[in-house]
Image (spheres, rainbow, N blue to C red):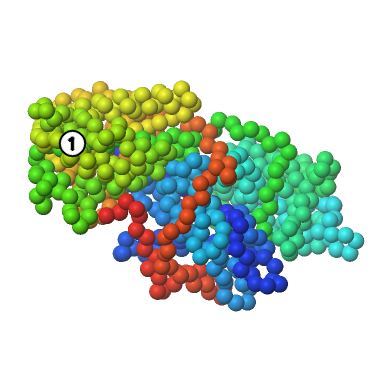
Amino acid sequence: MISSETMKLNLSLKATQLKNVAGAFKGKSDPFAVVTLLANNREAKPRILGKTEVIKNSLDPDWVTTFTIDYELGQPVNVLVKIFDEVRKGENKSMGSAVFDIGAILGSKGSTKAKRMQDGKGTLFARVEEYKGDGRKLKLKMSGLKFKNLDGFFNKSDPFYELMKRDHGLRGSEWNVVHRSSYIKDNLNPNWDLEYIDLDILCNGNLDEIFVFSVYDHESSGKHELMGQFETSVNGLIQAKQSPGIQIMKNGKATGTVVVHVAEVVGSESALNENNPRALYEKVPDLVQSMSNVRLEPSAPPLPKPIAVHGKATFADYIRGGCEINLCVAIDFTGSNGDPRQPGTLHYFHPDGQLNDYEKAIRAIGSILANFDSDQKFPVMGFGAKYGGVVRHCFQCGPTEEVDGVQGILDAYRQTFQSGLVMSGPTVFTEVIETAAARALSSQERAKSLGKQKYTVLLILTDGAVSDVNATARCLDAIDESPLSIVIVGLGNADFSGMQFLDDRAGDIDITQFVEFEKHKHNSSSLTSATLDEIPNQLERYFQRHNIMPNPPIVVEEDEIVVQAEEEEIDLTIDFSEDGNVAVGKTSSGVFIPSGAY
């Protein structure tokens, strides 16, 4: 058995067309966002992850601050993003809110989602990418020399610098600000503070990756003026220590020089032990919370390259490169489930709409895996029933070969009982496993011919152990090189020792996971965590065994992103202290029930 490691994902945010709530004759709002990790059950408590910097005078903020979130495939993770207009002498004003499912963001095209916000006009965009930081930081100390003045005869410019990294996401291939310095007032020879910059955030840990260094003249209006810029890398800055400096350019002309005094890569421990109040690197210092985010288009930006993976390629790398996870469902219709017309049996349909255990498992697991399948088309199979007096160990459920969405799976399951079947036996998995493996291979081959990638998860729902464990084990050995994971959920109180053998059996390739539903009957998150936690490692191992690297991150244009309406109102208030700290209000519940919960 292979346990899935928790993924660390960086969440970044931007908003467009916010409603101005500053009031008459007060200019535009100064928005910032507060991000809260929501509780998914009544016993848990919401937890504030932090807040972004303030973007002054902007209704289209693109925040620099990111938030690192732990994510496991089987655990629903939802965050509430609330936007406020900063009021210096008074109460901050709400500008809107939205809830995002982190798994849904990761599985969407470009790992980006957009929602129309509650409580106000505007659209909020959220993007995630895997954080692979190893604690290394760029220790950086720079100054400027003889910058061209942009403030006329009686004033001097107030220079600050920004570092911009190439990302694939909100506007396709774009340059996004990942670090911003404080500004130095009235100084054409600025001496900036020593900085510690996370290398994963700056350059994905690649010391040769190009980023853009830009110098601006700070303006209180938020419309900062470009003074000059250049392209470089971490290694380029390290080498520049031995030179007189690097010229900044604007419109093809030199407008000053940046001198690099310190540029070296240090470990996290070194940074923590430095006697410097900024050694714990904060990407957005308090001194510059009022700065706006300025987006630039460098001249002749390079085209996206195939993804360069530093270290082992991960599940998130494959998903961001467009790999889709197809879900197949196989349902046990053997007689041991009991007469479905009798209350208390496993296939009984409650007249009040309450879900039976089969339906609970389908909805909980299907709702998570559906995030990673763009067309939402799922084949549903049955086994263990007679048609025309003949026992069928693999047959189609529902009127179509594939159904639409998780609700389509539930509908096909119910429709099967109207198809004239006779519940029978024995319990045989081999045919549905072989059928799913063939589909998985065919799907991956078609995807490969188009430069894409597909992986399949077969969910088998059964009330008893297989009739021939050894035959099932041989079948698994025969198909274990398929792009396929098999999740078996045992329902009811049968003896499942033979099923556990299939999970625990020795073998070079592990593609099977068995879970007893009864142990997780009252907690859907516990069920999905237990059933899905091995899939990321199984997907990685399949592609790496076959020397298939992740595709480049999917490029998605902003106008391609479907903006969803925000429907969920969350009972959560945010309290602000005088020093700017934030906390969950005492009267808030902050509970969010995921769509697949039971």
**Figure check: 86 above or below 9:** below
Q: Tell me the crowding category of disc 1: few under 14, some 14 to 19, or many 20 or more residues within 10 angstroms, Cα based.
A: few
* Quarter containing the N terminus: top left
Amino acid marked by disc 1: Ser
**Residue 497 at what x, y percent from top left?**
13, 39
Image quadrant in which the C terminus is located: bottom left
For residue 29, above or below residue 405:
below
Q: Is residue 493 visible?
A: no
Percent position of residue 366, x then y: 32, 44
- Foreground pick, 355 / 107: 355
Q: Residue 561: where, in percent of width, then height?
A: 53, 45
Residue located farthest toward the bottom when viewing the structure as drawn: 90
Please state if 194 lies on the left or on the right of 327 as rendered.
right
| Front-lying residue, 194 or 74 | 74
Figure quadrant of residue 331: top left
Q: Residue at left 13%, top 39%?
A: 464
Residue beneath label 1, please? 419
